[in-house]
Amino acid sequence: MHSSLILALVAFLPQLSLSIPVVGSELSKSQRSTTVFSGPLVKSLRRRCGPVSQYYNQKKTDWQQYGLDVWLDNWMIAHAGDIQTNSWGFAGAFGQWALGNPDWSCRDDGSDSDCDFNACDSRVLNRKKNETRQAYYVLESTNRLHAYFQGLSEAFSTAAIASALSKDEWALTFYKDKDDKSVTALKEILNAATTVVGIGTAFAGLAGPEAGAAASAGNALFAGLVGAATPLIGQHKNDVFEKSADLGGILGKIVTESMKAFTAANNALMHGDNFVNTGDIRTYMAQGLFVNFAGVDKNGVIDVVNNILVGSAINQLWRQQKVFIMGGGPCGDNTLGPGPSNAMLCRDGKAWFLYYWEEPGGLVLNSHKWGWTNPPPGFDKLGQGDYEGVKVEEIIASSLDAYIVAGFNYNSETAANRVVESLKLGLDPGAKGAAWEGTFTIPVCDIGWAMTADVKDKGYILQPYGKDFRPHWCGLVCKGDAQTTKDFIAAAQMNNFQSPKHMCGDDPGY
């Protein structure tokens, strides 16, 4: 009898084939448990699993096509009492209704299973008849929203971020001015930190063209997490900067403490609360933003946050010194002088150069007392090692974009607003890294107008780097406009600075 049974099984085996899910696929745990066999038994397996299996491989367009936003609105209105009385709020009430599990909390409390569910084996879910699809989509979206917050927490808690930021060389690397203005100025970096955290969270898989019609939900997520992180980061505004080296340690704390914002967001939304005045869980799942969310790209988030935060810190250090960008003439043309080729960006046919006007220390009696143009402090560290994610081309591009948007007045509020606008358009600020508009706001002077103008010594407006070279600005160098030139001089920390016009004879008017 045993031998005949074995022979029967052997004969039947070729009719079966194993179907192993690919690691990294978009199947959730509830889906993987049912995607095991294909072949003659598949029909009976589907019957055992119930109707829910026909709704697997869901997309954002499915959520939209079947009106899940309106359906969820109606469900929450009809079950308001259940949500209020359940200890776990919305998640618990929906878990009770859809799964028969009133303890489906989806809280971030250290558990790996408090938001799991088995769609295939749930009799309650598979008996929802014409509401099985809607119930399943909401369960999946809730589960994946929960996984999103967990993924962010893991990314932001990694030692890679803190170690990259907590360096003891900031003061010596990127700051070399005669006056130590860095102590108070570095606090400005904290104003931009929440926006950087928000960019990192959006980059975690929610921004860009893939967001589609759900971009508004991603925008709410950005606003909510920025709002939650603000008070946490604000705790550091009175930290003492005894030297600019302290900056790295504080930035490291800021990033790792942002985890608290993610936990708060998860728990508030799962409970059904309005999170930081941005809306409840319906706002965050609108248009199916999370119905097929594939997971957080943790390494990508780490890189984005590192690069933009490091870039923002370097920017603030440089903004306290005579660091500036000049250009606007044709690429490869030396009519306005030969700029430094190793600190140049050619964009749209125009060349832009990064400069630092260095001044000698102590008493100098020769022509060097007027200073000279050099690379900014720390220039030689860019694009490698700890600063690999920040390159000179990105610095110039980011500053140019900021200048186009807001001139010399691009601040942290402008930065946040511009991120919101970009997310609404389905763009992804994080994808640009340190080149994202406003990461750098180095003052820009457009001298392209001088190509055809009669300007004294215009062949010396730009100069190479080195002690033997000093630019001559013997006209209203920036756009040929007095006010623009004065604003540039002020933004570049050059008020009452005579060196650029020392050889001009007549006062150039700025």
Image: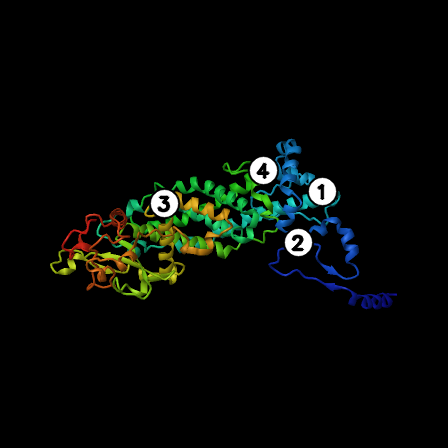
Q: Earlier in the sequence, mark 4 or mark 3?
A: 4
Q: Residues within 10 Å of mark 4 (few under 14, many from 20)?
A: many
Please state which of the two labelled residues, at mark 4 or mark 3, is closer to the viewer: 3
The Cα–Cα distance between marks 3 and 1, rounded to whole angstroms, is: 49 Å
The Cα–Cα distance between marks 1 and 2, rounded to whole angstroms, is: 17 Å
Mark identifier at residue 484: none
Q: Earlier in the sequence, mark 2 or mark 4?
A: 2
Q: Which residue is at 23% across, 50% downward?
A: 494
Q: Position of residue 216 (x, y in %)?
A: 53, 44
* Horizontal side of residue 325 vs 455, given as left or right: right
Q: Earlier in the sequence, mark 1 or mark 2?
A: 2
The Cα–Cα distance between marks 3 and 2, rounded to whole angstroms, is: 43 Å
In this rendered view, identify the residue nearer to me: 300 or 244: 300
Q: Which residue is at 69% across, 42% downward?
A: 99
In what element is the residue under mark 4?
A: helix
In what element is the residue under mark 2?
A: loop
Q: Which residue is mark 1?
A: 131
Mark identifier at residue 411: 3
Q: Which amino acid type is shown beneath numbered disc 1?
A: Glu
- Name which quarter of the figure residue 354 lies in: bottom left
Task: Give the image's coloring scheme.
Answer: rainbow
Name above or below for residue 368 compared with residue 66: below
In this rendered view, identify the residue nearer to me: 164 or 3: 164
* Horizontal side of residue 295 vs 328, given as left or right: right
Q: Residues within 10 Å of mark 3 (few under 14, many from 20)?
A: some
Q: Earlier in the sequence, mark 3 or mark 1?
A: 1
Mark identifier at residue 57: 2
In what element is the residue under mark 1?
A: helix
- Name which quarter of the figure residue 41 lies in: bottom right
Q: Position of residue 382 (x, y in %)?
A: 35, 61
Mark identifier at residue 271: 4
In this rendered view, identify the residue nearer to me: 149 or 284: 284
